[in-house]
Amino acid sequence: MSNNLIDNLKLELNRVNSENDLMNLKSNYLGKKGEITKLAANIKNLSVEEKKEVGSKLNSLKKEAESLISEKFKSIKNEIINKKLESEKIDITLPQRESNLGSIHPITQILDEVLDIFEGYGFQIVEGPEIENDYYNFEALNIPQDHPARDMQDTFYLEDEKVLRTHTSPMQVRIMENNEPPIKIISPGKVYRCDSDVTHTPMFHQVEGLLVNNDISFSNLKSILSSFCSDFFGSNIKTRFRPSYFPFTEPSAELDIEWVNKSGEKKWMEVLGCGIVNPKVFEFAKYDLNEVSGFAFGMGIERLAMIKLGITDIRYFYQNDLKFLKQF
Ligand code: PHE
């Protein structure tokens, strides 16, 4: 009888594979109405002699059943843990994801470099509005209505006599209106012109420079800008000042630098406009013309960046192509 029972138990244990089923099985054998418990209940009808014998057999039967069941518990638990370990396995040999650390935009890098150099010369940085009054962008810079120079700059016009500033020169007047000489400022920022090709984008950056004192001459201007070019491009850089025209400076010039293009040809490239501040502009600023003199310049940051970084199409800067931007 007892061997039979253990064999059955073993068979049933083999089929069980969840903790729940095992609990049920356990109660079928060892619970209140379980097989083994029922056998034990019959003992009371036996003689003393038989009680002893059957009692001890039942005891060992019970122990064996208990140990078989508790072993099965262990093995089910182990299996659960193993499955979990298997499914939550981390493959530490997988290569990590590429990290996408941001970087400073090349235009910002070049702009910072330019500002650093001029700060080193003692210029103070000031900033002005991108939406500008017609007055500051044109009028006070000696570019009246109907002046042909207005056509030089493809202006984006806004409502109420406002424009997107076409250059940073309006800052010359804004600064002089509110400050007495000496003045020594640079003003960086975005400017806008309705123009787009390999060397023009509708938005680009300029840095304006203005130095006003008594006795400022063109040689002061040449000296500062030449130092800037050798500090920015290296001391081997060749520069040339070429006569030009701006309504707000007189005389006016453009500064070209020599660079070598991809095919090895030497080329002159215009990088900035400059000149001696036109007395007309001092009049708008209400300065005493007998007391003051000064120079101004305005440079295009994208131009400087193209030359320094060897980029042939200005539009690359604004296509947000990470492959391009990551090179800097
Ligand atoms: N504002 C001029 C331009 O945008 C540059 C310039 C600035 C020229 C200051 C002379 C003096 O082309």
Image (tube, grey):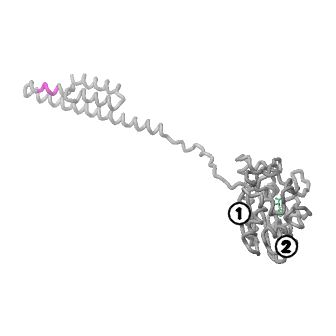
Q: Is residue 309 left or right of residue 20?
A: right
Residue 215: x %, y % from top left? 84, 77
Q: Is residue 40 magenta?
A: yes
Q: Quadrant of residue 114?
A: bottom right
Percent x, y for residue 184?
76, 71
Q: Position of residue 214 (x, y in %)?
A: 82, 77
Residue position marked by numbered label 2 in the rendering: 220
Which residue occupies the foreground of this view, 23 or 52? 23
Residue count near mark 2 (Cα–Cα under 10 Å), binned few <14, some 14–19, many ≥20: some
Q: Which residues are magenta?
A: 39-43
CA neighbours of label 1 inside 10 A, class few (<14), some (14 to 19), many (20+): some
**13 in relation to 150, above or below:** above
Compared across the picture, whether 273 is left or right of 41 comes to right
Q: Give the residue at x 35% y 25%.
A: 15
- Of the four image quadrants, the one with ligand 1 is bottom right
Q: Amino acid at mark 1?
A: Glu
Residue 227 in view here:
no
158 is within the stretch colored magenta: no
According to the image, label 1 marks what residue? 127
Identify the secondary structure beneath mark 2.
helix
Quarter of the rendering containing residue 246: bottom right
- Identify which residue, 117 or 175, lies in the foreground: 175
Residue 277: name its quadrant: bottom right
